Amino acid sequence: MQKTTTKLADGRELIYFDADGTAADRNYSDLRPLEPTTALSEIRRDPVTGDHVTVAAHRQGRTYHPPADECPLCPSRDGRLSEVPAPEYQVAVFENRFPSLALGAAEHVATDRTAFHETVPGAGRCEVVCFTPEHDASFASLTEQKARLVLDAWTDRTAELSALPGIEQVYCFENRGVEIGVTLAHPHGQVYAFPFVTPRTVKTAAAATAHRAATGRNLFEDLIADQLAHPERVVLAGEHWTAFVPFAARWPYEVHLYPNRRTPDLTGLDEAQRAEFPGIYLELLRRFDRLFDTDAPTPYISAWHQAPAGHRDELALHLELFTIRRTVGKLKFLAGTESGMDAFMNDVSPEQAAHRLREVATHG
Ligand SMILES: [Zn+2]
């Protein structure tokens, strides 16, 4: 993988990732009239739940509004200027122009440690990952080689962002579909570098610590062993990866994908794991698109869980993929029980979901 780091007109970083030996000229300047933006986001701690909440209400700076018919993630071509100045690319990553978290927030937002008003600057980083230059493609339509390049880009971003001062957790994810609230159709994902440990990871770490105290063993190693011993919820088992519907799935169709050999984050994957991942992940995404009897692409969220610095001994890298679609034309909304109480109600049994996800496997 070849990596070329450049700057956009307003000073944001843009990074091209190219497969070895195929990098073209990456020396294109961003010709747009962009003013730097100022991120004034702050992170408040809820004194009742202990959760961190990012408040990014103030965003300053002149906005450059491209015409609606010009995709900002397509390469810059035919006089149309986008976020990627080159006329073509393979995988491109750039800092979000209006980020929820930005390292610069530290210069503008004061830290407050007083009780009931705990506030720190939203000093993190938000990046956009363009998976392909092809506007009408999807992740599921990528070749294994292209998907591997995205994996390598995620890995690079994890290593680099984890090393930044104050960053606690790096989160790579994709929101797919208008039902999820995606406004740009161009295939892309995001990377958030959080200056705190996210609420879900705090909970997971506590479960792993309790499991270690009770059994002397690692929670995730026992979890994988349990899936393999009870294969009714296993969806796809490779030599190095296992995909299953969790025993207590929260979403109608939810798959968790783990490397069989535990590693804290993407940087810990070995070559055998990295080589097998694209085939497994692409197959899962293609099965998601076949779940429902409709041509409409399945909306999904794909979320990489990676261990923060203080939890590398017990947590395990894995990917959680789920759709909010229950059936054709029906979405699962987070309503009273889920939004009000974090208490999920699932209409599809995890065993039925796993059966369906095996049924729609690619044949031949
Ligand atoms: Zn596009």
Image (cartoon, rainbow, N blue to C red):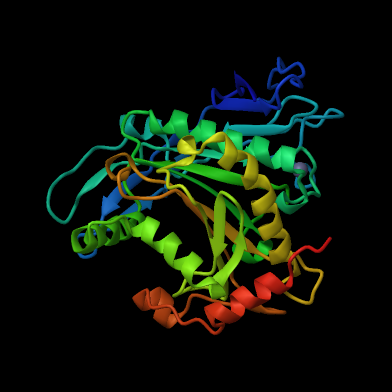
What residue sits 74% from the left and 51% below the top? 138
Extreme right residue here? 78
Question: Relative to 84, is 296 above or below?
Answer: below
Question: Relative to 115, is 340 above or below?
Answer: below
* Residue 101 visible: yes
Say whether residue 267 is left or right of residue 107: right
Snapshot quadrant of residue 341: bottom left
Extreme left residue here? 115
Residue 246, x across and y down, in percent:
48, 69
Q: Nearer the viewer, residue 316 or 42?
A: 316
Image quarter in which the N terminus is found: top right
Ligand number 1: quarter of image:
top right
Residue 14, x across and y down, in percent:
60, 26
* Residue 97 visible: no
Extreme bottom residue here? 347
Snapshot quadrant of residue 79: top right
Say whether residue 222 is left or right of residue 287: left
Residue 114, x across and y down, in percent:
12, 48
